[in-house]
Every structure is written in structure tokens, then in C-alpha cells.
């Protein structure tokens, strides 16, 4: 009897999701119980912004992808149940954002993410 293959998280899948025109593909990569920790100028390491669950993460992604900006996956490394990637974004007015993320994976889904971001001011 054949067994179903476990979902696989790949850099190609992540690229398609990050560089999509909407947040829907990227939202699908998160587990229901995922946690996202964000560190930036406003939410520093001692008090990061923490989003719990796919619904909270989805709301943030919907907001980001509703803006007039592009997203590009620069680099991605996947090793077992861990992944890391760099993403660059640019608003239509030329303001740039750079982020670095570390991921924990389970069954091909993101369960934990730490995102560090900086942007032009």
C-alpha cells in the first residue's frame, strides 16, 4: 500500500509565494498554530511584535500585500525542518525594505518565524 508523501517546503515554492501579487499563496505556507516574531525599529528585540496563529499572520500579510510594492526572494536555504531567507521589497515611491527570516517547519508548513526587517527612512 502506498503512503502519501509528506508536503515538502522548497525554495521554489517560497519564491512563488513571496513574489506573488496577493498574500494568498504565502498565507497557505503557515501552520494553523504558527507564531511570527517581528523585530525592527519599532519592535525591538526585548519587545518584539508576536503574532499567534495563521489568522493573525494572515491579517498582517493581507495588509502588506495590499500596498503598492514588489517583493523579491533574494536567497533561501532549506535544510530539514529549518529554513532561512532574505527578501527585498520596494514601494512605488522607491522606499526599500530588507528582511531576513529564520523558519521552523513541520510537515512542510511554517510553525515558527523570526523576521528582522529594516527600511529606508
Image: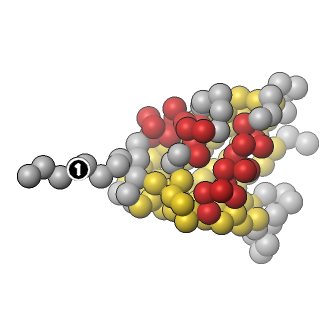
Indicate the quadrant containing the C terminus: top left, top right, bottom left or bottom right: top right
Q: Position of residue 5 (x, y in %)?
A: 25, 49
Residue located 55% across and 65% down the image: 33
- Asked whether 45 or 50 is in front, the reply is 50
**Residue that extends furthest to the front in the rendered view of this protein:** 1
Q: Is residue 110 toward the left or the right of residue 99 in the image?
A: left
Residue located 45% across and 37% down the image: 13
Q: Report whether residue 112 is seen.
A: no
What coloring was used for the rendering?
Answer: secondary structure
Q: Position of residue 86 (x, y in %)?
A: 60, 44
Secondary structure beneath label 1: loop
**Residue that extends furthest to the right in the rendered view of this protein:** 121
Q: Is residue 93 toward the left or the right of residue 6 in the image?
A: right
Q: Where is residue 11, by image quadrant?
A: top left
Q: Position of residue 10 (x, y in %)?
A: 41, 42
Circle 1 crowding by C-alpha within 10 Å: few under 14, some 14–19, many from 20: few
Where does label 1 land, which residue?
A: 4
Q: Report whether residue 121 is seen.
A: yes
Residue located 51% across and 32% down the image: 16
Seen in the picture, residue 23 relative to 47 is either above or below; the reply is above
Q: Position of residue 60 (x, y in %)?
A: 73, 50
Residue located 78% across and 48% down the image: 118
Amino acid at each position: 500500500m502506498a503512503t502519501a508523501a509528506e508536503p515538502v517546503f522548497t525554495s521554489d515554492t517560497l519564491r512563488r509565494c513571496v513574489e506573488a501579487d496577493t498574500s494568498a499563496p504565502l498565507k497557505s505556507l503557515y501552520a494553523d498554530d504558527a507564531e511570527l516574531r517581528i523585530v525592527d525599529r519599532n519592535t525591538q528585540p526585548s519587545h518584539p511584535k508576536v503574532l499567534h496563529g495563521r489568522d493573525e499572520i494572515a491579517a498582517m500579510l493581507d495588509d502588506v500585500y495590499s500596498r503598492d510594492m514588489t517583493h523579491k526572494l533574494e536567497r533561501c536555504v532549506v535544510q530539514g525542518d529549518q529554513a532561512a531567507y532574505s527578501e527585498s521589497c520596494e514601494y512605488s515611491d522607491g522606499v526599500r525594505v530588507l528582511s531576513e527570516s529564520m523558519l521552523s517547519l513541520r510537515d512542510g508548513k511554517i510553525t515558527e518565524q523570526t523576521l528582522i526587517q529594516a527600511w529606508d527612512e
